[in-house]
Image (cartoon, rainbow, N blue to C red):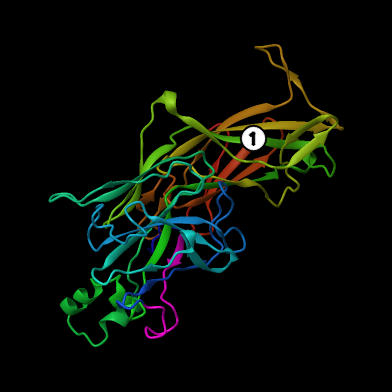
């Protein structure tokens, strides 16, 4: 979109035909065509933490498992899932490791063929390392289109993605050829995807979109006096989003693919934490923490937290430790009398307000599906942190400035 488009990071999943001609392919005697998948990674724009980075910083796939489903054109039901090897539950396709342009491998290294008759819609989803990924098919009725429902429960480290195969303009050009009327062209397009279209070099093309928001965190010093080349310094040891929803259902249908968030009572809200893995040793005591090393450059902390989208703000709890003159600073808890060496700090991260740059009309004031946000913390010590949240470079929007007391 023009006007500060709400970002959707897309991963191109291209199910391409073989480069051989139809006569050269491994075609059964009955004339069926193979379903051959390959996967591209156009940009290094996707980071996740559950099972590692999809794309990461080097733009490569690395053995991710995608579930692919296929149903007869325009239908979703158990009966319409008649590609035997895929079935109604779908089939796993695995990306090759360390590959910028990865071929996909079907589960058990099987070979799949289109049935001689019928065209098919292809769908796919990725839910990282979530254990329960069982999908329920709600079949078509006379009044209601069918859909696939996948329950999910996130912990802030998993990425959720979904896709439906759609013809590209280039593929349409391969199919419509010399056809002149829109009606003729639509009839031809409706034959995708099938043995018929595979013979013409047209295989399913899917763009996977993210269903969650994503927050990354960076820190720098607000003044030089808290900087130190040695162990001394103020360390961030924990960052948590407090009291958020974490359950939902992925809905996949011919018309749309989206995440439905299940509202939670206050008793069922959870905290999502940033994984900070940087071990600090002081005497016999060890902890994980990141300290600012510059008053100019931001230092990244962990990978990311991926929460459910749609919130205008997240309450965040930050915990810190300080080492001064080689000694871990402690204090007495006034309530319990316990000696503590970790200091909590609470504030909010508000979503950037995104407006149309020409009209000034509001586009969004929430954390948006598929957007990545860079959260920048400027530290002045244990008692003051300034926070700036901004959209990451995938799509630019208005920045916001946030102080701990807002």
The residue that appears at 71% across and 38% down in the rendered structure is 289
> Residue 12 in magenta?
yes
Q: In this view, does 322 lie above or below 98?
A: above
Q: In this view, does 39 lie to the left or right of 286?
A: left
Q: Nearer the viewer, residue 44 or 215?
A: 44
> Residue 94 in magenta?
no
Element type at marker 1?
A: strand
Q: Would residue 227 be seen by someone viewing this image from the given angle?
A: yes
Image quadrant assignment for residue 177: bottom left
| Classed neighbour count for the residue bearing mark 1: other residues with Cα under 10 Å, few (<14), some (14–19), many (≥20) | many
Q: Position of residue 312 (x, y in %)?
A: 43, 40
The residue that appears at 66% across and 33% down in the rendered structure is 384
Task: Write down the region rendered in magenta.
Answer: 10-27
Q: Could you tell me what secondary structure mostly forms the magenta stretch?
A: loop
Q: Is residue 386 above or below residue 254?
A: above
The residue that appears at 68% across and 27% down in the rendered structure is 343
The residue at which mark 1 appears reads as 238
Q: Where is residue 230 in the image (x, y as percent from the top left)?
A: 85, 42
């Amino acid at each position: 979109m023009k006007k500060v488009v709400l970002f959707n990071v897309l991963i191109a999943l291209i199910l391409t035909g073989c480069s051989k001609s139809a006569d050269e392919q491994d075609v059964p005697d009955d004339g069926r065509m193979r379903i051959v998948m390959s996967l591209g990674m156009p940009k290094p724009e996707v980071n996740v933490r559950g099972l590692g980075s999809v794309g990461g910083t080097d733009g490569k796939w690395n053995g991710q498992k995608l579930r692919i489903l296929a149903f007869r054109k325009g239908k979703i039901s158990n009966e319409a899932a008649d590609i035997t090897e895929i079935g109604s539950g779908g089939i796993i396709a695995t990306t090759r490791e360390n590959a910028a342009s990865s071929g996909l491998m079907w589960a058990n290294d099987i070979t799949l063929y289109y049935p001689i008759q019928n065209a098919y819609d292809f769908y796919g989803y990725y839910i990282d390392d979530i254990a329960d990924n069982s999908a329920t098919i709600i079949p078509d009725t006379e009044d209601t289109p069918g859909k696939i429902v996948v329950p999910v429960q996130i912990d802030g480290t998993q990425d959720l993605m979904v896709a439906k195969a759609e013809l590209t303009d280039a593929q349409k050009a391969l199919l419509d050829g010399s056809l002149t009327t829109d009606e003729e062209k639509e009839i031809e397009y409706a034959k995708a995807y099938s043995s018929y279209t595979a013979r013409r070099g047209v295989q399913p093309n899917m763009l996977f979109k993210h269903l969650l928001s994503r927050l990354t965190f960076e820190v720098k010093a607000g003044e030089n006096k808290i900087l130190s080349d040695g162990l001394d310094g103020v360390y961030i040891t924990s960052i948590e989003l407090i009291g958020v929803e974490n359950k939902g259902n992925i809905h996949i249908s011919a018309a749309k693919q989206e995440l439905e968030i299940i509202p939670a009572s206050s008793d069922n809200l959870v905290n999502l934490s940033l994984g900070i893995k940087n071990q600090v040793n002081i005497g016999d005591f060890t902890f994980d923490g990141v300290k600012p090393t510059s008053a100019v450059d931001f230092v990244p902390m962990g990978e990311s937290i991926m929460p459910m989208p749609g919130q205008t703000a997240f309450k965040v709890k930050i915990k810190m430790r300080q080492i001064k003159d080689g000694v871990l600073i402690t204090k007495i808890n006034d309530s319990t009398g316990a000696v503590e060496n970790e200091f909590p700090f609470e504030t909010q991260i508000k979503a950037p307000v995104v407006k149309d740059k020409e009209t000034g009309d509001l586009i969004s004031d929430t954390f948006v599906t598929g957007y990545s946000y860079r959260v920048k913390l400027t530290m002045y010590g244990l008692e003051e942190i300034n926070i700036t949240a901004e959209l990451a470079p995938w799509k630019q929007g208005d920045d916001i400035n946030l102080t701990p007391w807002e």
